[in-house]
Image: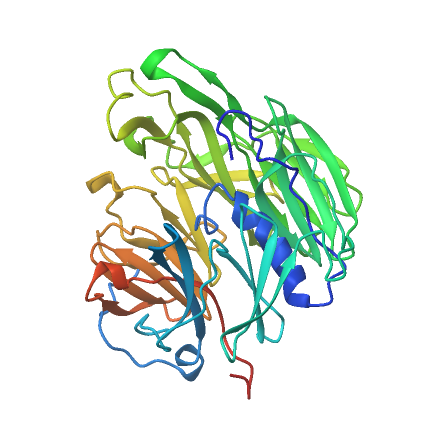
Amino acid sequence: MSLWDNTSGDAATIVTGLTAVAVCAAAVSLIAGATSCTGQSHLGAGSAQPGAGSAHVGASTARAVLYGLDEHFIARGDYTSSELVRLDPLTLRRQRQRGPLLGDNFTLAASPDHSVLAAGSADHGDLVLLDLKSMRRIGRVRIGVASNGEGVARRPLPGSPFAYGRAAGRAVLLTMPWRGMGSARLSVFSAGGRLRSVRLARIDAFQCCPAGTGPGEYVRQRRPGLAVDPAGHRAFVVGAGEPIAVVDLRTLAVRYHPWPAVTGAPPTTRTFPHQVGNTYAQAGPRRAAAWLGQGRIAVSGEDDLPPHPSQAQASVQITPVRPAGLEIIDTRRWQARVIAPLASEFFTGGGFVVPLDDQDYGSASHLGLTGYGPDGKAVFHLLGHRFAGGVFGPFDGLAYVRVGPKIAIIDLPGRRVLRLIRMPNPNDEVFPEIGWEPRSGGR
């Protein structure tokens, strides 16, 4: 995708009418995985520190099924391909010697009975189907083209999608204009292929329009967050310095609510150096949001500031960022509380929300993991004052956390660290991308 105009060739499409349920799930997941601004939900926990090391594990936890992706460099073709790997949930070791190669199909979805896996890509419309018992390919589907060569279904989206949610059999997308600045749009589509969309006139969303000059050039951006209440048929779109949009998913009626008064810790005014590699710097606010239940949503993100000209020509470009903190907004009373002023990301799972930072900023970000309930009260704290470099999961109650050279396996229902493991070689690290608890009698 171009940083300059948000175009990526043809308009994004969704697929419907496929007989395999797994393909429908993958088509939905494909859009989210291809465009999410936070990766795996950014990712977006007091009690005494539990002991690490071995621990008693319940039958459910021990039987969790996990799959990850291991990248391989293909010398003859000069490209990388992802290998699907089944992992042991308590060691993250391979459970099979070799798995199938999926090319650049990184987005995974499983059929309801967990027998078929569909893998999609952000760069093209192909879906790869695999039988999980034999770990073999059973087919490939080209989006928009059926096996007889006729179109399956094709629905152009009104913009470039960047945030995703689900509710009552619907997929909910937040999109920005394909080109230039403009308002966000919220789109809802069903498994039957019906696509509806509404413009959010008071919420801006874009990634375009270079600014600055010479080595200090950057791209402007605004990315609001999306939280979906699956039971209440509502979506909340939350930007920076803008009213909160509340959308009825049945009628697409839009209401706006002013940002509620904030209590708790004051927002930070500190900035931190953020490494962005050799890509174009981006300046503007980014937010992520998630539904917590009990009428509450979590919101976090950061404000990316323009790069300093003296840093812009470095081999590793560094730009200043200001964390937005983690807020919990009660949409029943329209009250907000800041619970972690230095957070720029968060993780949700097991009924908890955990504030995170996307980079190690030194002692300010060495906060371990603190889990809060939907009411904003701290429920547990783990990992002392270590930096948590990313959370994967939860998968059947387990979360996996990067902690320096080690990986912490967290039992969320038990609020404890099960194990701290060290891979023999960093190249052996394969983190779970998808997982579930097998049904009784299942594999």
Farthest residue to the top: give it. 213
Q: Where is residue 341 in the image (x, y as percent from the top left)?
A: 36, 37
4 left or right, relative to 199:
left
Farthest residue to the bottom: give it. 441
In the depicted view, which residue is nearer to us: 216 or 408?
Answer: 216
Q: Position of residue 337 (x, y in %)?
A: 46, 40
In the depicted view, which residue is nearer to us: 86 or 48?
Answer: 86
Does any portion of residue 45 appear in the rendered image?
Answer: no
Q: Where is residue 386 in the image (x, y as percent from the top left)?
A: 22, 52
Does any portion of residue 103 appear in the rendered image?
Answer: yes
Would you place residue 424 above or below residue 134 in this image? above
Farthest residue to the front: give it. 76
- Residue under the image location 24 percent in, 39 percent down: 364
212 left or right, relative to 201:
left
Residue 200, quarter of picture: top right
Q: Position of residue 365 (x, y in %)?
A: 26, 43
- Residue under the image location 40 percent in, 37 percent down: 325
Residue 56, quarter of picture: bottom left
Would you place residue 383 above or below residue 163 in this image? below
In the depicted view, which residue is nearer to us: 261 or 115?
Answer: 115
